[in-house]
Amino acid sequence: MVESRSEAPLDMVQMMVNMGPQHPSTHGVFRMVLGIDGERVVSVDPHIGYLHRGSEKLCEGELYTQIVTLFDRMDYLSNFNNELAFCMAVEKLMALQVPERAEYIRVIMCELNRIASHLMFFGTMGLDTGAITPVLYAFRDRERVQSLFEAVSGARMMHNYIRVGGVKEDLPEDFRQRMAKLMPQLKQGIEEGDRLLSFSEIFLARNKGIGVIDGKTAISYGMSGPALRASGVPMDVRKDEPYSVYNRFDFGIPIGEKGDCWDRYYVRIEEMRQSLRIVEQAMAQMPDGPISTPVRGVLRPPRGEAYARAENPRGEIGVYLVSDGSDKPYRVKVRPPSFCNLVALKYLLRDCYVADCVVILGSLDVVLGEVDR
Amino acid sequence: MLGNLKGLLVTLQTMFRKPVTVQYPKEHLPVASRYMGFPVLMWDKQLEEPFCTGCMVCVRNCPTQCMSAVMKDNPHHAEGKSPRRKIVESFSINLGRCILCGMCVDVCNFDAIEMSHQHELSKYGRNDNRVNLEKLLEAGKKYQEESGSVEAAP
Ligand code: SF4
Ligand code: SF4
């Protein structure tokens, strides 16, 4: 008996490991069932839907003005960008002209929001790779942006500030002084963070060459935003199809070389610098004038459909809107950047180590509120 | 050596700085003047009655359907003391459901409702977050005093 046991080949059994939904580094409630062979991941089975609130369906029962609040809650780290995408869709349908000043306010808010969102990414990316300090620095700077938002819109995250036809209120009187103080602080904060984490040897070892995806594959998976640009594809809705007043600013689109985790990280750091440039230019060019087009009564866009796309911090957000001429939309469909980026996860996780799962998922920077909607 | 000294300098600077931490329940950070806390009803000091007429516009525009209002004839109007023909009889908001969106303030034609700076939700009783007209007006008076908000013309 003993002999035959030693002679028989060992059975290879795949072990299933459940990662999430309450795992701290899944950035929300996301569950991956990993099939592992030793240290290697051989299969991955992602489960989403834990944060499903039925936002798209809810939109069909709300007035157009009320839907803005739902869009706030989809991608809760880039609220302004989401509001903008929806408002642009309605404006397209109604052929509304947005006043100049409102466009500039929108751009400034969206770019600051992009910086705040990327700062959050920078902090959590540090956490995912085992660096605790960066998140403290990131939150210090994010807090400054957030308190500016509070002074402008009255809320720290759920702003409901961008409205169809313009914005809710004009900027507060001391906005320029506050910005003059905030900009150098942000600039310094980003440089500090860059020095602290980007070229740290441990961080490089954890990120370089991990989760590589080339441009063509990334496009075929439908990725967009920084995750796609890291693979060397210079695709950015702000440049390709400028919305709002983005065609008036001079800014670059940082791209990566290899499409690994480090590229996805560094593209975002560079993007923060570009966003600061945009904000600076927008502050200098901002004209005076009205801040919204008056819309009489309840919003009733004419029968028809419209599609608006905008560049979120996470990628391209698209809003498809069908109106039947009543005060509520017939259908609202969102193309969520996080969800489309998450699709590539299976490809990225092929043959990686268990420890790298966290880093790869972190580098995609998904917000589960938007994946599940 | 120089690096060490530089590091030490940073440490020294931070040592003599005021602490950043705020001892929360005892101290509060100031909120921005535009801050949107829970909605409150404003009190017309001249006529000694609420601005709200119970017209239900805010109720219909609330995204979460968390409020309700009832209208009645204004007894002050019958006596000739007030230009408001209708006035609010009862009003209730479920603050646990309110998402602080500020929509009610935008749509009110009488500037009768405002977003206060009150933002703490923890209460002792199960239903203490359902506030009625008295509580809303009381909170409104408090907010009017605190913010020194300008009286809206009726
Ligand atoms: S708060 Fe304003 S909108 Fe709401 S019922 Fe009163 S008067 Fe009407
Ligand atoms: S703030 Fe928004 S959710 Fe709250 S009562 Fe007003 S309309 Fe309703």
Image: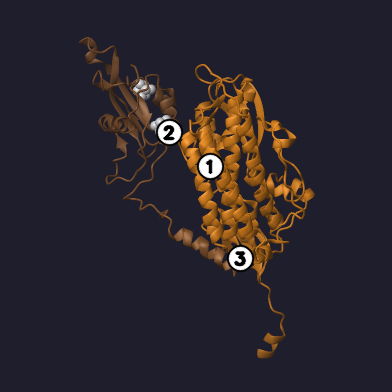
Chain colours: A orange, B brown
Q: Amino acid at mark 1?
A: Lys
Q: Amino acid at mark 2?
A: Arg
Q: Is residue B93 left or right of residue A112?
A: left
Q: Chain ID for label 2?
A: B
Among numbered discs 1 and 3, the one appearing first in the sequence: 3
C-alpha separation, residue under disc 2 versus residue under disc 1? 20 Å
Q: Is residue B44 left or right of residue A207?
A: left
Q: How many marks?
A: 3
**Cβ atoms under marks 2 and 3 closer than 8 Å:** no
Q: Which residue is mark 3?
A: A16
The answer to whether one can see residue B30 in this image is yes
Q: Which mark is residue B34?
A: 2
Q: Is mark 2 within 8 Å of ligand 2?
A: no
Q: Is residue A312 left or right of residue A138?
A: right
Quadrant showing the N terminus of chain A: bottom right
Q: Nearer the viewer, residue A14 or A233?
A: A233
Q: Label 3's element?
A: strand
The answer to whether one can see residue A371 in this image is no
Q: Which residue is mark 1?
A: A181
Q: Which mark is residue B60?
A: none
Q: Is residue A311 above or below residue B77?
A: below
Q: How crowded is the residue under tag 3: few (<14 C-alpha within 10 Å), some, or many (20+)?
A: some
Question: In which quadrant of the rendered view does residue B108 lie?
Answer: top left
Q: Please tell me which residue is depicted at 68% across the width and 31% down the height of the picture.
A: A243
In the image, which is nearer the foreground, mark 1 or mark 3? 1
Q: Quadrant of ligand 2?
A: top left
Q: Nearer the viewer, residue B24 or A311?
A: B24
Q: Position of residue A353 (x, y in %)?
A: 67, 66
